[in-house]
Image (cartoon, grey):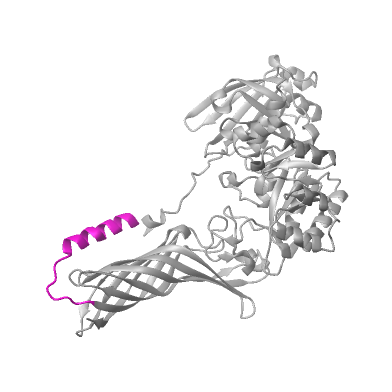
Amino acid sequence: MKTSFMAALLILWSVLVRAQTDSVFTLETVVSGAIQVTKYQAPPAAQSTTNTFLGSSFIGKVLWRPNHILAVGLQTGYVTFSSEVLQTQGTTNIPDVKVGLTAIPVQMAISMNPWSLDIGVGLGVYVLQSIWRIDQDQRANSTASEFGVHSWIGYEFMVLDRLAIGPELSMHVLSNRGVAALALGVRVRFDAIRY
Amino acid sequence: MWLTLSCVSQLDPVQLPVIDYQAELAGTTPLDGTRRVIVSGTYMVEEGNGRLGDTVAVHFDGLRFTIYAARNVTFVSAAGGAKADSAIFIGTWRAVTGPEAGRLDLSAPADQGGKELVEGKGTGKGLVLQGTLQLQNGRYYIRMRKVSASRTRLRGFQIIAHRGGGRNSERLGRSENSISMMLLSSTLGATGIEIDVRMTKERIPIVFHDPTFTARTVPSPYVIGSVENYTLLQMRTVARLVNGEQIPTLRETLKAVIDSTLLSFVWLDNKQPLVVDSVIRIQQEMLDYAKTRNRDIRILFGIPEDDILNAYEASPLKGTTPVLCELDVDVVRRVNAEVWAPRFTAGTQDALVKEMQKEGREVYVWTLDDENFILQYLEADVFDGILTNYPTLLAALFYTRQAKP
């Protein structure tokens, strides 16, 4: 899947790349916020009643787009994969426990924007944080890093000379953990520096 | 999205047949000790050796009829008994290196040793067991003949299953270091087990190998990172091993082994120096408990690394319980370990092993999984036990090898 996506990206880029007469280098900042549906390969806990959850995704990117379509940069953000209350009475003497999984992606991002589209992929780690809580006194947070991929496609409407806004569909995949999330939201791009 | 999740590797499912033993064995009489000895032994496989190899070992794990075969690392777990003037055994076979499994039906015909077996006469030499082994695409005819009696384990040789039964345990539907795995280990051929001891956040000794929770051991994404980040309560509410079991405490584990298995040896592979005192206390408590249950079992405190050694030597409980040491022989002598456990890569070390044995210590080697290596170490005939991930393979090779002149 990843290989096919990268191959398609490179082919598209080679077709679209073109000579530029007026060199413009841009440092872009992009923020996006989305509602997402997370699907676990199996219910995330023995007491979970579902393996599909509603969550959210907020991503920020800084991309350097030299004098052609392809841009490279870094991205991070905050992703909520799932949050639920587990009924644990029976296995323990406590009634229920709040649990959840969030992540901070730290990834290299590659993006291209043919026509008014923006297509990209982020490769790198997700710093996962698990949350376990009964009350303020009884809680546990633990972190671990997992490799993951974030891909997106967006459409941009220029609303000002340096500002574009539009819808974005994106996907987070942590294959080692059996987690995939499909997010639909809004992106805002601001060209911070042009030279 | 669902396509991308297929990146997560899955082992092929194992389909074990469902057998209604009570109904199918109605009218049979369970074999007593004398008759179980008659059945036990080394058998030459006259037909069906494509599945089981030329030689197999037949044993009883309590009342369970078991077969250990080196070919495809196959074990049989069955029940049976005498019926009229023959005997029947029904159960399941598993090739632990793959997903292959199925039903096995065997009988000891009256005119081929079955009658003598039912009467409790003779040694069973020449006894024939024949029947079918079910495969996905049909049935396989099997016929095997007993060629020698089952011998007692020389010097009490220990077949020690790694991580409570073997790292291949995911194919058995039971997780490594789980109590359910340990309950199965003697059916796999093990006479003892090695288990890994870590600690929770509040320093309760638990049985778990890795320092962190990963999808390999605990699939829940709500339990990640260092094991020590979680209290026992937190683990109990959310963490389940890959086959759904709870992570057991050391005390629960040893109690289950004493109460519900025939294992005679437990090797505590200590991973964290901070719980050395707690582990020794539980070890002593469980050794005392075993005495009250008339269980002949040895539980050894393992010293695998220098940090555990240092903690042990600093402990006020040093010397109060039996010890197994993996370090060099000087340390073994210093801590007066009952067992020295060198790594197999050091070779058979015949002279050093004999020196240790002269001092009254036993020597177990770890971890041997390859058939050729196991044979090489068995032929050296100096060790008192071998740690393996494939107790079935070791049992098959050990018991059938004894049958040779």
Going by the image, does B241 lie left or right of B85?
Answer: left
Closer to us: B292 or B168: B168
Compared with B341, A120 (above or below) is below
x, y (%) of residue A4?
A: 30, 55
Q: Is residue B54 magenta?
A: no
Write down the region rendered in magenta: A1-25
What is the count of numbered marks?
A: 0
Compared with B182, B224 (above or below) is below
Q: Is residue A13 magenta?
A: yes
Q: Is residue B92 visible?
A: no
- The outermost residue toward the bottom is A160
Closer to us: B193 or B258: B193
Closer to us: A141 or B111: A141
x, y (%) of residue B102?
A: 55, 34
Instruction: Determine which quarter of the picture holds residue A11.
Output: bottom left
x, y (%) of residue B156?
A: 79, 36
Closer to us: B363 or B328: B328
Going by the image, does B275 lie left or right of B290?
Answer: left
User: Mainly helix, strand or loop, the magenta region?
Assistant: helix
Residue found at x 73% / y 43%:
B192
Residue found at x 60% / y 32%:
B372
Instruction: Determine which quarter of the picture holds residue B398.
Output: top right
Residue found at x 46% / y 51%:
B9
